[in-house]
């Protein structure tokens, strides 16, 4: 058993969530808990960092020499 809470949501969102819960044969509480878990996970600093790292690990292919030189010039003046 988890924490019981009350929240207010717009009527149309409630109706959509209720219909989705029925289609998935899950309780509204289960649907809300899963949705909130996904939202929290997606917005946690660690998951954001992991997503950015994964994007960087994929690589960017070959760079245009002009773009590469311009980027290096911009970064030279960056205080980071």
Image (cartoon, rainbow, N blue to C red):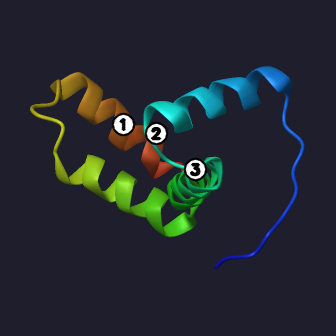
Q: Is residue 21 above or below residue 15?
A: below
Disc 2 versus disc 1: distance between alpha carbons?
Answer: 5 Å
If you read the primary sequence from the N terminus, does the residue marked by circle 3 or circle 1 appear first? 3
Dividing the picture into quadrants, the one containing residue 68 is top left
Percent from the top left, x then y, of residue 27?
A: 57, 50
Residue assigned mark 3: 27
- Report the quarter where the C terminus lies: bottom right
Q: Residues within 10 Å of mark 1 (few under 14, many from 20)?
A: few
- Real-space Cα separation, disc 3 to disc 1, in angstroms: 52 Å
- Residue shown at 46% from the left, 30% from the top: 23
Q: Residue at x 64, y 33 (%)?
A: 18
Q: Position of residue 19 (x, y in %)?
A: 59, 27
SS assignment at label 2: helix
Residue 74: mark in rendering: 2
Could you say which is closer to the camera, residue 72 or residue 22?
Answer: 22
Q: Contact (CB < 8 A) between labels 2 and 1?
A: yes
Question: Crowding at label 3, few (<14), some or many (≥20) Cα neighbours within 10 Å?
Answer: few
> In screen coordinates, is 11 left or right of 14?
right
Q: Position of residue 6 (x, y in %)?
A: 88, 57
Figure check: 46 above or below 58: below
Residue 8 appears left or right of 45: right
The disc placed on residue 71 is 1
Residue 57 seen in the figure: yes
Q: Quadrant of residue 25?
A: top left
Secondary-structure class at tag 3? loop
- Dot 2 or dot 3: first in sequence order is 3
């Amino acid at each position: 058993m988890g924490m019981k809470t009350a929240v207010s949501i717009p009527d149309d969102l409630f109706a959509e969530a209720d219909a989705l819960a029925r289609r998935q044969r899950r309780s509204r509480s289960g649907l809300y808990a899963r949705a909130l878990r996904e939202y929290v996970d997606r917005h946690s600093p660690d998951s954001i960092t992991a997503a950015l790292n994964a994007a960087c690990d994929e690589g960017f292919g070959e760079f245009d020499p002009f773009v590469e030189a311009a980027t290096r010039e911009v970064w030279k003046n960056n205080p980071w």
